[in-house]
Amino acid sequence: MFVSNNVSFKMMKIYFSMFVKTFFIQGLWNYERLQNIGFLFILKPLLCKIYSDETKKREAFLRHIGFFNTHPYMASLIIAIVASMEKELSESKYLGEVSDVNTVKNIMEGPLAAIGDSFFGGTLRYLIVFVSIFILFLFANMFSNKNNKFVAYNFWIPLVFIFFYNIVHIPVRFLLMFIGFRFDRKKNIFLLSNFRFMFLGKVLYCSELVVMIGALVLYLRFLFFGCVNINARFFESSVCDILIYAVLFAFSIFVSWKFSAVFLFYGTVLACIGVSCF
Amino acid sequence: MMLCVNKNIVFLAFVSALCSADVIAIGQLMICRPIFCAPLIGFFMGDVSAGLWIGIIVEMIWINAVPIGVAVPIDVSVLGTLSTFWMCKYFMGLHEAAIWGLVLAIPFAYLYKLIDIWGRDFNTKLMHWVERRVQNGEYRYINIGVAVGLFFFIAKAFLFYIFSMTIGGWIYRFIYSEFPNFVLKGFQKAWYLLPICGFGMAMCNFRKIRILFRR
C-alpha cells in the first residue's frame, strides 16, 4: 500500500527497520554536527544492502557524516527521499550529480524543522495538554464531593495526554517515511508544498484557545465550588478572591511576555508568602 | 484504585532517567513532559493526584521549555519528578511541601541542564571516534556509537537522580522543618494560585494570533 509493488520483502524489512531507528535519530546528538550519526544510523541498513562495491559504500557513508539537523519527526521524509536517491545512484539510474543528494538534504532540513517545531512543538502539544487539563477539571467539577472517583479519573489524565499525542505523531512519522519511499523526489516535494500546513495550524491554534479558556473557566469553578482547602483562599468573600485571580492572570501574561517562567514562579510564591505575613 | 507502591530510590531514579532520555535521546514520545512523568512517580510513591497537580503546574508554567535546535532549556521532567518524589517520601499529602519541592527543584533542574550540556559536548568526541571508524570502513561502530551515547545519557541522568533524590531530599526535609507558619500558609495559597499563572503563561503565546491570521 505505502511502497510500490515491485519492492521485495527484504527491502520492506529494511524500510521498517529504518522507521524504527528514526526514534533514535538523536541518540548521539552533538554540538558539532547535531544529528549526523543518528542519520547514518538510520541509513546504514539500506546503504549496506544497496552498495556491493566497498569503495562506493564508503563514499556513501562519508557523504552523510556531515552536519544534519531537522525536527526529529520530520526527518523521516528527508531520510526516505535520500534513501530513494541513494538507491538510484547505486543502480546508476540517477542522471544528476552525486552532490545533489546532500543539496536536497540541506535544502529540506531547515523548512521541515520550522514546520515540525511550529506544528508539533508549538501547536499540537499545547492543544493536547489543554485537552487533558480540561478533562481533569471537568471531572474535578463533576466528582468534587466524591473524592475516590476523582482520584480514579486522575489516573487516566496522563494516559490521555500520551495517547492523543502519539496517535497523531507516530502515524505522521510512519506516513512521511513511506510516502517518501512510495513516490519520487519531485512528487514528494510537490505533495509537501501543496499540503495546507497553515490552515491546519490555524484550526489547531483556534481549538487550543477555546479549550484553554474552557479549562480556565472550569478551574475557577472548581476553586470556588469544589473541595478546595480554606487556607488557599485570601479573603472570606469569593468576589475579592476573583479579583486577585484576575490581577494575577493579567500579571502572569505580562511577566511571561517580558521575563522568564522561573521569575514568574518565584515571584508568585514570594507574593503568596508576603500576603500570608499579614 | 490499585497503586503500585515502590519507594526504592534506585528503581525510581531509573524510571526518571528513562523519562528524561525521552527529551532528546529516545523517541520523543513526550513521556518526559511533567504532565506524564510527575503522576508516574506519584503512582509509584502512592499519590497520583499530587503528582498530577504538580505536573500540571510545571507543564503550564514551563510550557515553552522545549529543546529546539541547539537550545537547552531547563529540564522540566526534573522539576516534576523531584518535587513529587520529595513530597511523597517525606510529607505525603501536604500541598505546602509540594510547593517547597518545586522551589528547591529549580536549582537542581539548572544543575541538570549544565550536566546535559556537558554530555552533549562529550558526544562530539564520541562522534569523532565513530567518524574515524567509518573512514576505515568499520560501519558497525555507528551502532556502537549510538548505543554508547544512549548509555551515557541514561547513566548521567540516573546518577543525577540518585544524587538529587538522596542529598536533595535531605536538604529538602531539613529546611522544610525550619519554616515558620506564615511561609507554609504562603505555600498553601501558591498550590491553587500557580495553575492561574500557568494559564497566563499559556495565554501569552496567543499574543501573535493577529499576525498569524493576517498571512
Image (cartoon, coloured by chain):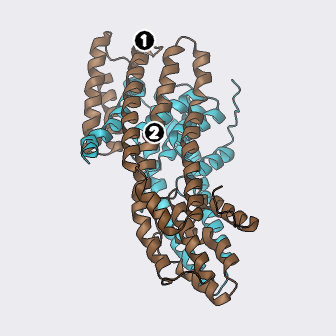
Chain colours: A brown, B cyan
Which chain letter matches label 1? A
Residue B64: x %, y % from top left: 39, 46
Residue found at the very far right of the displayed protein = A9
**Is residue A168 depicted above or below A238 in this figure?**
below
Residue A145: x %, y % from top left: 54, 11
Q: Which residue is drawn at 60% across and 35% down?
A: A159
Count neighbours of disc 1 (C-alpha within 10 A) and say few if under 14, some if 14 to 19, many if 20 or more: few
As helix, strand or loop, the secondary structure at mark 2 comes to: helix
Count neighbours of disc 2 (C-alpha within 10 A) and say few if under 14, some if 14 to 19, many if 20 or more: many
Would residue A224 appear left or right of A182 to someone viewing this image? left
- Circle 1 is placed at which residue position? A225
Image quarter of residue A253: top left
Which chain letter matches label 2? B
How far separated are the C-alphas under marks 1 and 2? 24 Å
- Circle 2 is placed at which residue position? B59
Q: What amino acid type is highlighted by mark number 2? A: Glu
Q: Residue at x 26, y 19 (%)?
A: A243
Image quarter of residue B208: top left
Q: Residue at x 43, y 72 (%)?
A: A106
Image quarter of residue A234: top left
Would residue A163 appear left or right of A230 to someone viewing this image? right
